[in-house]
Amino acid sequence: MRALPRLIAGLLLGWCATATANPGDVQRFPALSGKATAHLRIQGSTDSEVFATVIGDYQRLHPDTEVIYEDVIAWDMYERYVHPPAHSERADLLISASMDLQIKLVNDGNALAHRSPQTEALPSWAQWRHEAFAISYEPVAIVYNTKLLPAKRVPHTRRQLLELLRASDAPLRGKVGTYDIARSGVGYLMATQDNETGSVSTALLAALGSSNVQLEERTGVLLDRVTSGNLVLAYNVLGSYAQARIDAGAPLAIVQPEDYTLVLLRTAVIPRAAAHPEQARSFLDYLLSPRGQRVLATEARLSPVLPQAQSGAQQRTVRPITLGPGLMVYLDTLKRRQFLETWRATVLPNAPSP
């Protein structure tokens, strides 16, 4: 199992013994009543140990529901739906921070619509066509090891990060990490948004390449490496995951860049091929209910999307990525290939061509 923050571990102890982990990052949560009369299969890009608390609370309200949770990276989730493996079971609900891939599923007619008091309460920017629904928002951050990077050298903008990467003493050489955007759907989305928004994005990528940047598919692995000191700093990672580790005592700190902070929306889609769409609708309504949003915030440590759940939260200057068809621009086959080729040539200048 991936490294688990002590806080989340404590919350799981009361009931997690009933959950059975299976090969391939599949976890089964038996009905609490002991006799399942309803079934729900979720594929999510959120680490299963994070989302387990949410499922556990839902089952307390629906004790006859058995839940299967598959921890799947976003690209694989999309590919499994579009090109399902033989004899595979279809998911009833897809939850991912890769907003572009979720929007493409909807745009291509692969989602079921859902309207309820809970979905109607969402702001307009947090749902699209009543088929894609934001359940949480994710500020994209720089995370660093406080024991290894002095406060006076901490970058607070991308330009400052660029200067640190270019510094003569090379403090981040071989010690900086980010997503492998060829494998990470979330990483690819962040990189394309940086390309559209940031004035120093090309220079920053080149400096990361010159600093022998370390590439990973998932936020959790990057944070493991920063926590252990294997890396000093990680760029463009999900801040909520880092905050959970900080709360559990990890020597980490978060910087939301002052030039701009991207915000991803963790988005749920009910696929048209769902075997149990009513259970999917029930779970989605729970996630968007005041109770579900509170559990997401206080136990799973994911930032809630609903304004009433955000009351009292510190407001920052952010640039939310809007749900909508504009996200599909970089999913065009030719556009994606060209973007990845340019990215590889810049970030991995000495790597052989794929």
Image (cartoon, helix red, strand yellow):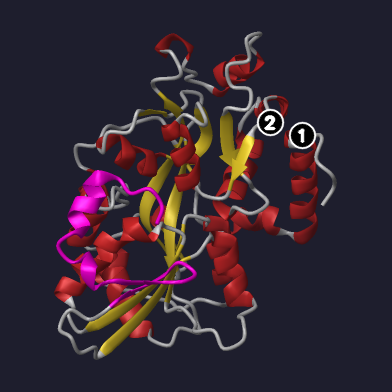
User: Which residue type carries mark 1?
Assistant: Thr
Task: Work out how far the residue at label 2 is from the one at label 1, CA to CA, in angstroms.
Answer: 6 Å
Residue under the image location 57 percent in, 29 percent down: 176
Where is residue 193? Give x, y as percent: 60, 42
Disc number placed over residue 12 in the picture, else none: none
Residue where numbered disc 2 is placed: 205
> Mark 1 packing: few (<14 Cα in 10 Å), some, or many (20+)?
some
Rendered-image quadrant of the N terminus: bottom left
Residue 343 percent coordinates (x, y): 74, 40
What residue is shown at x 66% (from left), y 37% (from top)? Answer: 195
Closer-to-camera residue (305/170): 170
Q: Total number of numbered labels?
A: 2
Residue 124 percent across, percent down from the top left: 39, 56
* Vertical relation: 29 (above or below) 104: below
Q: Is residue 8 left or right of residue 252?
A: left
Q: What range of the chain is rendered magenta? A: 1-29
117 on left or right of 275:
left
- Whether residue 130 appears in this view of the structure is no
Whether tag 2 and tag 1 are in contact, CB under 8 A, the answer is yes
In the image, residue 215 sits, relative to residue 60, either above or below, namely above
| x and y, in percent, of residue 248 in the image | 26, 38
What residue sits 22% from the left and 61% below the top? 292
Q: At label 2, which amino acid type do we have? A: Leu
